[in-house]
Image (tube, rainbow, N blue to C red):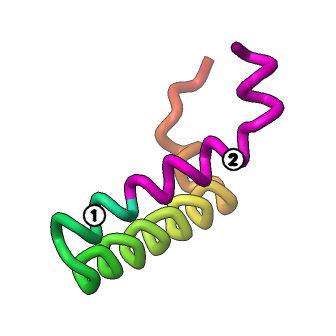
Amino acid sequence: MKVLFQQYQYAIIGGLTGLILAILLITVGFFKTLLVLILTMLGAYIGFYLNSIGFFDSFKRPK
């Protein structure tokens, strides 16, 4: 199973992404789906930025 996933990982991820987008488009509509996608990308960008500047390091307990 692990070998199968490694061989087809991008196809599986793409298929699941397409399925989620289709369900969102059918249930909530185009503009609400677009808003969800934009806010998700904005949140991911902010998270990557905060991680790159070491913002979360200050919350870790010293060992």
Percent coordinates x, y for residue 55 in the rendering: 55, 55
Give the main secondary structure of the magenta stretch.
Answer: helix
Residue at the spot x=58%, y=24% of the render?
62
> Residue under circle 1?
24
Task: Please say if 43 is above or below 9.
Answer: below
Q: Which residues are magenta?
A: 1-20
SS of the residue under disc 1:
helix
> Front-most of 45 and 63?
45
Q: Is residue 38 above or below residue 56?
A: below
Residue type for callout 1: Leu
Judge whether 27 appears above or below 7 on screen: below
Q: Residue furthest left?
A: 28
Q: Residue at x 40, y 72 (%)?
A: 37
* Mark with earlier residue (1, 2): 2
Residue 14 shown in magenta = yes
* Residue 34 horizontal side relative to residue 55, left or right: left
Q: Is residue 15 magenta?
A: yes
Give the percent coordinates (x, y) of residue 16: 50, 47
Label 1 close to label 2 by CB (< 8 Å):
no
Q: Position of residue 30 (x, y in %)?
A: 28, 82
Badge 2 marks a residue whose secondary structure is helix
How crowded pointer 1 is (Cα within 10 Å; few <14, some 14-19, many 20+) is rated as some
Q: Position of residue 26 (x, y in %)?
A: 23, 67
Q: Is residue 35 left or right of residue 62?
A: left
Tag 2: residue type?
A: Ala
Residue marked by disc 2: 11
Query: For residue 25, which quarter of the picture?
Result: bottom left
Name the side, left or right, on which 47 lies relative to 63. left
